[in-house]
């Protein structure tokens, strides 16, 4: 929905393909759409933050890569830094992410990777905007003098430099494993007291969406949690109060998640 909105509000023709909330995008769906030959670009969610889905990006990539002229864009805003995404191996042309999710930094800077193919394609696009003109950025980047066409959020860049060192110090595999372990903790708790909202074959390792089968007052629970400096997220959009979301991404440790779950138990009298 977000990609689609971004396209149409920028006067780029687009079609929206979606699935029921809580289900994953299938490689078959992607194949059927691209087989029409109508598209020169596809944008896919990696991790769907409103429903707790991680789409099967490897299988989707396999399909997309059959279509040589299709540019492959991936939104990994809520997964990059918390789950493995082999950008080059999967042939992802543009992957976008952000500072404030699994990278564990304050909000305010968007980050993307881009391929040579993406640059070549950008060269064919007349209206590329000003502040986000990939070609202008690439021109500066190639000079390796650490300048940008406009003033970037330098404070975020320094923070990210520091944080990326921390991430490498932890080790990528260990970091991804920690996310999986935190997810397992939350899933087990959710299944004990509630139900998982999301298709169990495609559960996200960075957040869990839980069906509010006990009809608890989520806003009230949150106010109580806030007294102890914690917060969970209500369901997104139509899913508000029907579901709630627990994030387990970034620099949280297993003990932090356990403490959150214990505190919820205490508040709800479980
Ligand atoms: C958070 C998020 C975004 C960015 O949303 P904001 O409007 O910047 O909050 C985009 N995609 C996904 C999957 C996200 O989780």
Image (cartoon, rainbow, N blue to C red):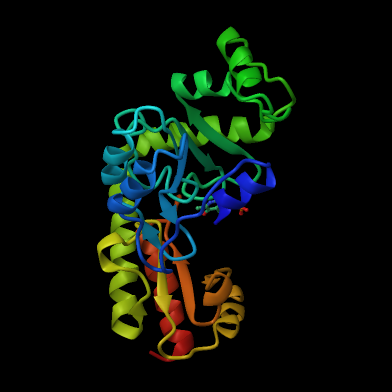
Residue 50 locus on image (x, y percent): 49, 64
* 137 relative to 73, above or below: above
- Which residue appears at 31% of the width and 55% of the height? 26
* 232 relative to 267, above or below: above
In the shown orientation, is residue 227 left or right of residue 167?
right
Residue 163 locus on image (x, y percent): 50, 37
- What quarter of the picture does the C terminus occupy? bottom left
Residue 150 lies in quadrant: top right
Front position in the image: 202 or 222: 202
Whether residue 269 can be seen here: yes
Residue 267 locus on image (x, y percent): 48, 86
Whether residue 74 can be seen here: no
Front position in the image: 154 or 94: 94
In the shown orientation, is residue 255 left or right of residue 243?
left
Front position in the image: 69 or 83: 69
In the shown orientation, is residue 53 left or right of residue 78?
left
């Amino acid at each position: 929905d977000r990609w689609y909105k971004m396209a149409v509000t920028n006067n780029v023709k687009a079609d929206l393909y979606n699935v029921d909330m809580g289900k994953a995008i299938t490689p078959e769906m992607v194949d059927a759409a691209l087989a029409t030959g109508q598209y020169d670009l596809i944008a896919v969610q990696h991790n769907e933050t409103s429903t707790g889905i991680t789409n099967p990006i490897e299988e989707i990539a396999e399909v997309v890569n059959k279509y040589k002229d299709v540019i492959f864009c991936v939104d990994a805003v809520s997964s990059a830094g918390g789950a493995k995404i082999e950008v080059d191996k999967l042939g992802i042309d543009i992957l976008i992410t952000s500072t404030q999710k699994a990278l564990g930094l304050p909000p305010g800077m968007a980050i993307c990777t881009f391929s040579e193919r993406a640059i070549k394609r950008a060269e064919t696009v007349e209206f590329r905007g000003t502040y986000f003109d990939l070609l202008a950025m690439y021109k500066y980047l190639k000079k390796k003098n650490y300048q940008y066409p406009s003033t970037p959020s330098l404070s975020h860049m320094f923070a990210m430099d520091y944080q990326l060192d921390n991430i490498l110090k932890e080790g990528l595999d260990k970091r991804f494993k920690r996310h999986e372990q935190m997810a397992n903790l939350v899933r087990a708790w959710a299944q004990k007291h509630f139900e998982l909202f999301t298709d169990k074959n495609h559960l996200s390792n960075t957040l869990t969406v839980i069906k509010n089968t006990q009809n608890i007052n989520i806003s009230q629970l949150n106010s109580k949690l806030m007294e102890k400096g914690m917060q969970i997220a209500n369901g997104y959009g139509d899913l508000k109060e029907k579901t709630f979301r627990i994030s387990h991404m970034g620099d949280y440790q297993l003990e932090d998640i356990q403490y959150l779950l214990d505190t919820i138990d205490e508040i709800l009298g479980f």
